[in-house]
C-alpha cells in the first residue's frame, strides 16, 4: 500500500482537525459572543423598522427551497432564524445563513443590507448562488468584523473595495464551487485588523509575485490559507522587514510556486501549522524548522526537489512537533541515533525519498507515534531490538502505532519479532524488499491487523497457520516470494473479514476439502503461478462477490465447471491464461462491468469465440483453438473494447466492418489466423489505435488510404498476407509509428521518398519479400530511431547509399533493454515481436528486441562498391548484403563494428583481400564470404578460426586454412620457418610408414613362428579354419 492511500483514513482527518483547531481561539470567542447576544434577546426588544424592511427586501431576491427563512414574517426580526441582535439596542449585529440552500433570482443581491449599520457578522457560506459576483456593497459594511462567503457559488472578481473593511478580522472566501479570482492583492493592505484570511481555491494566477509583499503589511494576521490558488513564481528570500510575526497557520499547498524555501520562515516563532506541499519547491529544507518551539504540523510533501540530510534535519529540537510529511522529495542520508527524542510525534511520512541505512533502535521511544511511512526509500535494515519499551506509560512497545509502511526499500534479513508486539497495528506493509526467512508465527497475534502486505520479497518456508486467527484481516498479499507447502482450511479459520487474497507466484498448494465453505467472501483472488491443479478450485463455488480472479499458470486442466458461470456476474477481471483448460465456452462469458478484463489466452479452448453484451474493456483469447468467424455485430456486443486479441487461433471469414465502430480500441490483434478478405476502411475510425496486428493471415487487396488517419498508431503488422499495390501516401501521416512490418506480401512500386520525413520514431522497417523496385532512398538516414532495416528479397537496384552510415539508432551500442509494449492496461499489454533473419536462420525476438540492430539488403540487385561509411555503425549486430552484385573491397575499418554477431557478404563480386582486422570481431557467430572474387591468404587467427571452409568457399583466389588450398610460397626453401615445418612434417611421415610396416610384419611372422614351434597348436588351428570354410560354402 502506498502511503497516500492510508492518508485517506488518517492524514486528511488529522489535517482538517488541525486546521479547525487553529480557528477555535478568536473565532470561538466571537461566535460565543454573537450567540449570547442572540439567545438573550428579550421578547420586548424589537428591531428597527428600517432593519426589518432591509431584511425583507434582502429576502425577496433569495429563493428559499428549504424554507429556512420561513420565520422572517413579523416585525420582531430578532426572533428570526439566523438573525442576531444586540440585547440592549435591538440592532441587528449578525446574519448567519450558512448552509441554508439559498440561491438568487436575479444577477445580483439586493443592497438593502447597507441599511443595517451595526452589522458585524455576515455568513452566507455553502449556499447555491448561481455564479453571481460578490456584491460590491459588501465593501461598504463598515462595521463588519466577520465575513464568510466560502463555497456559496459566487464567481468573478473579488471586489477590491472589500479592502475598505478596516474592522474586519475574519475573511473567508474559499471557492471550490465557482471561478472566483483576484487581479491583485493590494486591496488587503486596508484590512488592518485582519487575523484570518482564507482564500482556498481562489484563482490568484494574475496576482504575480507581489502577493507576499501585500500580505506582509498585515501584522495582525495569524492564519493564512492560500491552498490551490494557482500561485506561481518565486518567494522573496529577503523581505525588507518581516511583519508576519504573529502567524500561526500558513497554508500555501497545491500551487505552482517555483522557489527555494525562504529562511525567514524559520524565524516566525509563532508558527504551529505549516503546509507548503505540492508545489515545485527546491533546495535545502531550513534546519531552523527544528527549532520552532511551537511548530506542531509540517507538510512539505510532493515538491520532488527539496533536500536535506536526515542526520542533520532530525537533530533539531522539534519539541512540539506532532506531524511531519516530507514525502516525495529528495531527503538523503541516515537517521540520527537520537531520532527517538521526537517524543510528541504522531505522524511521520518520509516516503519516496533517498533515505538509507537503518532504522535506529531509539525508534522505540516514539510512544505517541500512530502513522509511520518510509515507503520507496533505500533503508536496508530494521533493528533486531527496540529501545524505550519502559518509557511509554502503558509499558508496551509503540502502543499507538497503527500504520507501519516500509514497502519498496532494500530491507534484508528476517522480519523482526518485535513487530508482533505492536498491539494496535492495523496496516503492515513490507512488500518490495529483500526480506528472507519464514513469516513469523507471532504475527498471528496482531488481532487488530486489517492489512498485511509481504509480497515481492524472498520469504520462504510455509505459511503460518496462526494467520488464520486474524479475524479483522481484510487484505493479505504474499505474492512473489518463495513460500512452499500446503495451505489448509486452518489458515483461514477465523478470517471472516478477508476480502483480498494474493498468494500468486509461490509454490503453495491449496489442500482443502472438496466441500469446504470458506468463512469469507472474497472480492479479489490472485493465485496465479501457484500449483492449484489439476482440477478447477471447487471452494470458489461459495464466493458470490468475486470481482477479480487470477488463476493463471496454475496447472489447471480439463473444463471450467458450469457452476462457475453462475457466480461470475460481478467479475471485472478474469484471468485463467497459461493453463490447459479445454472445451467450448458458453456465449456469455465476458464480464459485464465497464472496462472489465477477460484473459483466456494460452489454453485449449475451442468452438466459436465467446461474447457477452456489456462493458468489457480487454479481451485476450489468443493462443487457443477457437474457430469460425468473428461476429459481424461485435461492436454492438462489446462497444467499449480497448484491447482485443484473437491471435494464434483458427478463425476464418472476414474482419467485420463494424469493428470501426469500436472507437475506443487501442490494441487490435488478429494475427496468425485464417482470415481472408480486405482490411475494412472503417478501421480508420478507431482513432485511439496504437497497435494493429493482422499478420499471418490470408488477407489481400491494398492498404486502405484511410489508415493514414490513425495518428496514434505506433505498431503496424501486416506481414505474411497477400497484400499488393503501392504503399498509399496517406501512411506518411502516421508520425508516431515505431514499427512497420509489411514483409512477405506482394507490395510493389518504389520505396516512397517521404519515408525519411515522416517517421522520426520508426524503430523497425520490414519490407522483406515483396516486389519493390528502384533505388534505395538516399535520405533513409533521417530515420534517426531506426534499428532494424529489412528490405531483403525485393527487386531493388542501384548502389548502397553511403548515408546508411548515418543511422543514429545503429551508430550507438544498445546498452539498456527496453520492453517494446503498447496499450498498457495494468499488467496487460501488446508486446512487440519481430522475426529477424540472422545467422542463416529466422529468430523471433520479443523481450530483447530493443537490443537488436540489423540491416538486411540481401537478395536484391544492388551494385557498386560497399561504402566505407557503413563501418560507422558500431552498434550493428546483424549485417546481410548477400546475393547482390556488390563490387570492390571489404572496408579495412570493418573491425570497428565490434558488436557484429552475424556478417553475410556472400554471393557478390567482392574482390581484394580479407582485412586481417576482422579476426578481432570477438562476438561474430556467423560469417560468410563465399561466392565472391576474394584473393590472398585468409587471416586465420582470432575469431576467424571458429569458422570452417564453407565460409570462404568458391573464392578462387583465397588460400590457407581452413581451405585445403595452400598459399603460394608455403613450400619456398628460402622461408626457414616453412622449411622447418616441412622437414618436421616429412620426418613424421617417415616414422609413420615405418611403424605401419613393422606392425604388419609382426602380425604375420609372430603367429608363424609360434605355430612352427608347437605343431599340435598348428594342427588344431588349421582344422578350425577348414570347418569354418565348410560352413560358409
Image (spheres, helix red, strand yellow):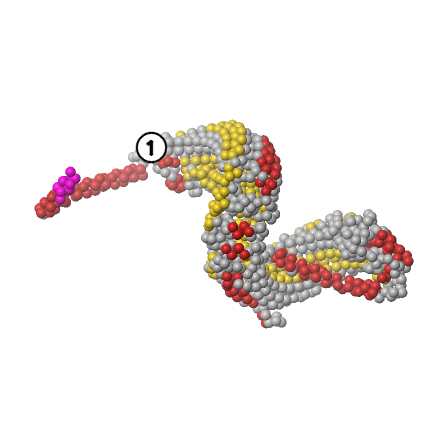
Indicate left or right for 82 with 369 as reference: right
Location of the C terminus by quadrant is: top left
Residue 548 seen in the figure: no
Say which residue appears at 80% left-offset and 65% top-offset.
32
Residue 636 seen in the figure: yes
Question: Which residue is at the front of the view, 705 or 999?
Answer: 705
Q: Position of residue 620 (x, y in %)?
A: 53, 45
Indicate left or right for 78 with 505 as reference: right
Residue 1029 falls within the magenta-colored stretch? yes
Residue 261 falls within the magenta-colored stretch? no
Q: Which residues are magenta?
A: 1024-1033
Say which residue appears at 13% left-offset and 42% top-offset.
1027
Decide: few, some or many residues near mark 1? Use Cα within 10 Å; few <14, some 14-19, many ≥20.
Answer: few
**How many marks do you count on the picture?**
1
**Residue that label 1 marks:** 968
Name of the residue lying farthest toward the right: 49
Name which quarter of the figure residue 333 lies in: bottom right
Say which residue appears at 54% left-offset and 50% top-offset.
565
Indicate left or right for 124 with 887 as reference: right
Q: Position of residue 441 (x, y in %)?
A: 51, 65
Q: Is residue 996 above or below residue 447?
A: above
Location of the N terminus by quadrant is: bottom right
Q: Position of residue 658 (x, y in %)?
A: 59, 37
Q: Position of residue 1017 (x, y in %)?
A: 11, 47
Q: Is residue 333 above or below residue 993?
A: below
Say which residue appears at 58% left-offset and 67% top-offset.
423
Indicate left or right for 771 with 950 as reference: right
Amino acid at each position: 500500500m502506498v502511503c497516500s492511500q492510508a492518508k485517506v483514513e488518517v492524514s486528511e482527518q488529522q489535517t482538517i482537525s488541525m486546521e479547525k483547531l487553529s480557528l477555535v481561539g478568536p473565532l470561538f470567542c466571537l461566535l460565543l459572543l454573537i450567540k449570547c447576544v442572540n439567545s438573550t434577546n428579550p421578547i420586548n426588544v424589537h428591531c428597527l423598522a428600517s432593519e426589518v424592511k432591509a431584511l425583507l427586501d434582502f429576502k425577496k431576491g433569495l429563493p428559499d427551497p428549504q424554507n429556512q427563512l420561513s420565520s422572517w414574517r413579523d416585525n420582531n426580526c430578532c426572533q428570526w432564524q439566523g438573525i442576531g441582535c444586540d440585547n440592549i439596542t435591538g440592532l441587528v449585529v449578525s446574519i448567519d445563513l450558512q448552509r441554508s440552500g439559498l440561491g438568487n433570482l436575479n444577477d445580483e443581491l439586493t443592497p438593502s443590507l447597507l441599511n443595517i449599520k451595526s452589522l458585524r457578522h455576515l455568513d452566507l457560506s455553502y449556499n447555491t448562488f448561481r455564479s453571481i459576483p460578490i456584491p460590491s456593497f459588501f465593501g461598504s459594511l463598515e462595521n463588519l468584523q466577520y465575513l464568510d462567503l466560502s463555497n456559496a457559488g459566487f464567481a468573478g472578481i473579488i471586489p477590491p473595495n472589500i479592502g475598505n473593511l478596516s474592522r474586519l478580522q475574519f475573511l473567508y472566501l474559499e471557492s471550490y464551487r465557482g471561478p472566483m479570482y483576484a487581479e491583485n492583492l493590494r486591496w488587503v493592505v486596508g484590512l488592518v485588523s485582519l487575523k484570518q484570511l482564507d482564500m482556498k481555491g481562489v484563482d490568484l494566477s494574475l496576482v504575480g509575485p507581489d502577493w507576499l509583499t501585500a500580505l506582509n503589511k498585515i501584522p495582525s494576521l495569524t492564519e493564512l490559507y492560500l491552498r490551490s490558488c494557482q500561485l506561481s513564481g518565486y518567494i522573496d528570500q529577503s523581505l525588507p522587514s518581516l511583519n508576519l510575526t504573529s502567524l500561526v497557520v500558513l497554508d500555501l499547498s497545491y500551487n505552482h510556486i517555483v522557489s527555494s524555501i525562504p529562511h525567514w520562515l524559520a524565524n516566525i516563532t509563532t508558527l504551529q501549522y505549516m503546509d507548503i506541499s505540492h508545489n515545485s519547491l527546491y533546495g535545502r529544507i531550513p534546519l531552523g524548522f527544528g527549532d520552532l518551539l511551537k511548530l506542531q504540523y509540517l507538510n512539505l510533501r510532493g515538491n520532488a526537489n527539496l533536500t536535506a540530510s536526515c542526520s542533520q534535519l532530525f537533530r533539531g529540537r522539534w519539541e512540539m512537533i506532532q506531524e511531519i510529511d516530507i514525502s516525495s522529495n529528495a531527503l538523503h542520508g541516515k537517521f540520527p541515533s537520537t531520532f527517538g527524542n521526537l517524543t510528541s510525534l504522531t505522524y511521520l511520512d518520509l516516503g519516496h525519498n533517498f533515505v538509507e541505512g537503518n532504522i535506529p533502535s531509539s525508534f522505540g521511544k516514539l510512544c505517541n507515534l500512530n502513522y509511520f511511512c518510509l515507503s520507496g526509500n533505500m533503508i536496508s535494515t530494521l533493528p533486531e531490538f527496540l529501545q524505550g519499551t519502559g518509557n511509554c506509560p502503558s509499558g508496551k512497545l509503540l502502543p499507538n502505532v497503527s500504520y507501519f509502511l516500509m514497502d519498496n526499500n532494500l530491507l534484508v534479513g528476517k522480519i523482526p519479532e518485535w513487530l508482533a508486539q505492536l498491539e494496535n497495528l492495523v496496516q503492515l506493509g513490507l512488500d518490495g524488499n529483500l526480506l528472507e526467512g519464514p513469516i513469523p508465527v507471532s504475527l498471528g497475534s496482531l488481532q487488530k491487523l486489517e492489512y498485511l502486505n509481504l509480497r515481492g520479497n524472498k520469504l520462504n518456508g510455509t505459511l503460518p497457520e496462526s494467520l488464520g486467527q486474524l479475524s479483522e484481516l481484510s487484505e493479505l498479499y504474499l505474492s512473489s516470494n518463495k513460500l512452499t507447502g500446503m495451505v489448509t482450511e486452518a489458515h483461514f479459520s477465523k478470517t471472516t473479514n478477508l476480502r483480498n487474497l494474493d498468494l500468486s507466484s509461490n509454490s503453495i498448494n491449496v489442500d482443502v476439502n472438496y466441500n469446504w465453505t470458506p468463512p469469507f467472501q472474497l472480492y479479489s483472488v490472485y493465485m496465479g503461478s501457484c500449483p492449484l491443479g489439476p482440477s478447477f478450485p471447487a471452494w470458489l463455488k461459495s464466493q458470490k462477490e468475486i470481482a477479480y480472479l487470477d488463476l493463471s499458470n496454475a496447472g489447471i486442466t480439463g473444463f471450467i465447471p458450469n457452476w462457475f458461470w453462475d457466480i461470475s456476474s460481478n467479475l471485472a477481471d478474469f484471468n485463467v491464461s497459461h493453463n490447459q483448460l479445454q472445451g467450448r465456452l458458453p456465449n456469455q462469458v465476458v464480464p459485464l462491468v465497464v472496462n472489465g478484463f477477460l484473459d483466456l489466452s494460452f489454453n485449449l479452448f475451442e468452438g466459436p469465440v465467446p461474447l457477452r453484451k456489456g462493458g468489457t474493456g480487454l479481451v485476450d483469447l489468443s493462443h487457443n483453438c477457437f474457430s469460425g468467424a468473428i461476429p459481424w455485430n461485435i461492436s454492438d456486443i462489446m462497444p467499449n473494447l480497448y484491447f482485443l486479441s484473437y491471435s494464434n487461433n483458427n478463425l476464418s471469414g472476414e474482419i467485420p466492418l463494424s469493428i470501426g465502430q469500436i472507437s475506443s480500441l487501442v490494441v487490435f490483434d488478429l494475427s496468425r489466423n485464417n482470415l481472408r478478405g480486405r482490411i475494412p476502411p472503417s478501421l480508420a475510425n478507431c482513432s485511439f489505435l496504437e497497435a494493429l496486428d493482422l499478420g499471418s493471415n490470408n488477407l489481400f487487396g491494398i492498404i486502405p488510404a484511410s489508415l493514414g488517419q490513425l495518428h496514434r498508431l505506433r505498431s503496424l503488422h501486416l506481414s505474411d498476407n497477400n497484400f499488393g499495390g503501392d504503399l498509399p501516401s496517406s501512411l506518411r501521416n502516421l508520425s508516431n509509428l515505431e514499427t512497420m512490418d509489411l514483409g512477405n506480401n506482394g507490395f510493389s512500386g518504389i520505396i516512397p521518398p517521404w519515408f525519411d520525413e515522416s517517421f522520426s520514431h520508426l524503430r523497425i522497417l520490414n519490407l522483406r519479400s515483396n516486389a519493390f523496385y528502384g533505388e534505395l532512398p538516399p535520405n533513409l538516414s533521417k530515420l534517426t530511431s531506426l534499428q532494424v532495416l529489412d528490405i531483403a528479397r525485393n527487386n531493388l537496384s542501384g548502389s548502397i547509399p553511403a548515408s546508411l552510415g548515418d543511422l543514429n539508432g545503429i551508430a550507438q551500442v544498445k546498452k539498456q533493454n527496453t520492453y517494446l509494449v503498447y496499450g498498457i492496461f495494468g499488467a496487460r499489454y501488446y508486446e512487440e515481436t519481430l522475426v529477424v533473419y540472422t545467422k542463416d536462420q529466422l529468430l523471433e525476438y520479443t523481450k530483447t528486441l530493443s537490443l537488436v540492430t540489423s540491416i538486411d539488403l540481401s537478395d536484391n540487385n544492388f551494385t557498386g562498391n560497399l561504402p566505407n561509411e557503413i563501418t560507422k555503425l558500431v552498434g550493428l549486430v546483424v549485417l546481410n548484403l548477400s546475393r547482390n552484385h556488390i563490387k570492390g573491397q571489404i572496408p579495412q575499418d570493418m573491425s570497428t563494428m565490434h558488436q557484429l554477431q552475424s556478417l553475410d557478404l556472400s554471393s557478390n563480386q567482392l574482390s581484394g583481400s580479407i582485412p586481417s582486422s576482422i579476426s578481432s570481431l570477438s562476438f561474430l557467430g556467423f560469417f560468410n564470404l563465399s561466392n565472391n572474387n576474394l584473393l590472398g591468404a585468409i587471416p586465420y587467427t582470432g575469431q576467424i578460426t571458429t569458422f570452417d571452409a564453407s565460409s570462404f568457399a568458391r573464392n578462387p583466389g583465397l588460400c590457407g586454412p581452413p581451405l585445403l588450398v595452400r598459399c603460394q610460397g608455403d613450400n619456398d626453401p628460402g622461408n626457414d620457418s616453412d622449411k622447418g615445418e616441412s622437414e618436421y612434417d616429412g620426418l613424421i611421415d617417415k616414422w609413420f610408414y615405418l611403424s605401419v610396416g613393422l606392425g604388419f610384419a609382426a602380425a604375420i611372422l609372430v603367429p608363424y613362428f609360434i605355430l612352427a614351434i608347437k605343431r599340435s597348436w598348428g594342427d588344431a588351428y588349421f582344422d578350425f579354419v577348414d570347418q569354418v570354410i565348410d560352413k560358409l560354402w
